[in-house]
Image (cartoon, rainbow, N blue to C red):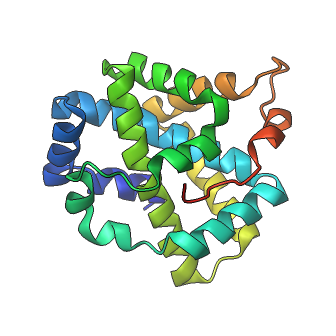
């Protein structure tokens, strides 16, 4: 099972209920937002990791701050008003594109942008935790992490909502309108993935 699908399956039942209550939305809309948000976040991380500097920054951040223990009490984390490093991770992953990404997830789910930002801030540390756990269990280096993220991106692209989310993400990240987001990523890499 892909990391994306594994995390999606964990975000059901009581965990989904806790997250829905925290952002003030019904479970169905929250689930729809998760289905759009996870591919967008994973896709943005994959894009950052296509450059050696970004992949190494991610690897260092995972080794330093994200050991996967956040997943041991998923419901406890989602039920807390403290989403830990979520805001900082989003700043580094999405840069100035946060409002557009939030608007995109909002359009796909029906949640308002405030609810979506809260959702993204909760999901970002979970993705990092899952990647961190994978890194430790398999002894992954920066290049291996980048490969895993690209595989996850391909999995998401094959799913209808994931594919739509990734297409939307590409248009947000391609700031100079040349059809490729890769040349626009460089400006987002400074201090990538830090805790705060």
In the rendered image, which quarter is residue 96 located in? top right
Residue at image coords 41%, 16%: 107
In-front residue for pair 132/144: 132
Quadrant in the picture for the C terminus: bottom right
Quadrant in the picture for the N terminus: bottom left
Q: Is residue 99 left or right of residue 49?
A: left
Q: Position of residue 114 (x, y in %)?
A: 36, 25
Q: Is residue 168 above or below residue 13?
A: above
Q: How many marks?
A: 0
Can residue 55 be spotted in the picture? yes
In the rendered image, which quarter is residue 184 located in? top right
In the rendered image, which quarter is residue 97 located in? top right
Q: Position of residue 181 (x, y in %)?
A: 77, 32
Q: Is residue 4 above or below residue 114?
A: below
Q: Position of residue 170 (x, y in %)?
A: 67, 28
Residue at image coords 76%, 48%: 189
Q: Is residue 2 left or right of residue 94?
A: left
Q: Is residue 3 left or right of residue 147?
A: left
Q: Is residue 79 left or right of residue 90?
A: left
In-front residue for pair 5/73: 73
Residue at image coords 17%, 47%: 18
Residue at image coords 47%, 26%: 102
Can residue 154 be spotted in the picture? no
Q: Position of residue 44 (x, y in %)?
A: 63, 42
């Amino acid at each position: 099972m892909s990391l994306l699908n594994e995390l999606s399956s964990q975000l059901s039942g009581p965990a989904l209920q806790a997250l829905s209550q925290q952002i003030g939305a019904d479970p169905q809309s929250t689930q729809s937002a998760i289905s759009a948000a996870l591919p967008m976040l994973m896709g943005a991380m994959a894009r950052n990791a296509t450059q050696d500097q970004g992949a190494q920054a991610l690897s260092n951040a995972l080794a330093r701050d994200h050991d996967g223990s956040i997943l041991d009490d998923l419901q406890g984390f989602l039920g807390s008003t403290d989403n830990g490093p979520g805001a900082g991770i989003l700043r580094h992953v999405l840069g100035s594109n946060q409002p557009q990404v939030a608007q995109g997830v909002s359009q796909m789910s029906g949640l308002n942008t405030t609810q979506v930002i809260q959702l993204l801030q909760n999901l970002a540390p979970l993705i990092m935790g899952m990647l961190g756990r994978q890194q430790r269990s398999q002894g992954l280096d920066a290049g291996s992490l980048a490969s895993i993220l690209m595989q996850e991106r391909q999995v998401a692209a094959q799913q209808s909502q994931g594919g739509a989310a990734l297409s939307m993400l590409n248009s947000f990240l391609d700031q100079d309108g040349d059809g490729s987001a890769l040349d626009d990523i460089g400006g987002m890499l400074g201090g990538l993935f830090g805790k705060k």
